[in-house]
Image (cartoon, rainbow, N blue to C red):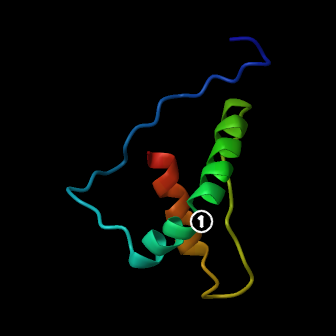
Amino acid sequence: ASAAQAVVPPLNAEWEIDRFQWPLAVLDLLATQKADFESVANHLHTAIRKGLRTIAITSAERGVGKSTTCLSLAAILAN
């Protein structure tokens, strides 16, 4: 691949689970804001193709939805 085309290595699962249930807060958020998360996912896919390897979801406060945001984004990216 040329320098302009980043090669994305395959992902290898570190661990597997038999089943997973999305938290209700995630399901509720995606029921009302799914298009917004899909838009972010599209931007992330583009950034990954350009070489992005790390993202951060952060806040100075507890309880403002960082984990819910991460899980919601993961749900969209998984599909």
Q: Is residue 11 above or below residue 58?
A: above
Q: Is residue 17 above or below residue 70?
A: above
The percent coordinates of residue 18 (x first, y second) are 20, 56
Q: Residue furthest front?
A: 32
When asked about the image quadrant of residue 34, the answer is bottom right
Q: Specify the quadrant of the image occupied by residue 6.
A: top right
Instruction: Name the residue rendered at 59%, 28% in the picture.
Output: 8
List the residue tagged with mark 1.
33
Assign a secondary structure to mark 1. helix
Relative vertical location of residue 29 with respect to residue 79 in this rendering, above or below: below
The quarter in which the C terminus is drawn is top left
Q: Residue furthest top?
A: 1
Q: Residue at x 37, y 68 (%)?
A: 22
What type is the residue that disc 1 sits on? Answer: Gln
Horizontal and vertical percent position of residue 1: 68, 11
| Residue sitting at x 65%, y 58% | 36
Residue reaching furthest left? 18
| Residue at screen point 70% across, 71% down | 58
Q: How many marks?
A: 1
Question: Front-most of 60 and 75?
Answer: 75
Vertical arrangement, residue 37 with respect to residue 24, above or below: above
Q: Residue 28 location, x and y as percent?
A: 47, 74
Q: Is residue 68 left or right of residue 61?
A: left
Front residue of 74/79: it is 79
What percent of the width, then of the height, locates residue 54? 67, 49
Circle 1 packing at 10 Å, graded few (<14), some (14-19), many (20+), is: few
> Camera-side residue: 30 or 73?
30
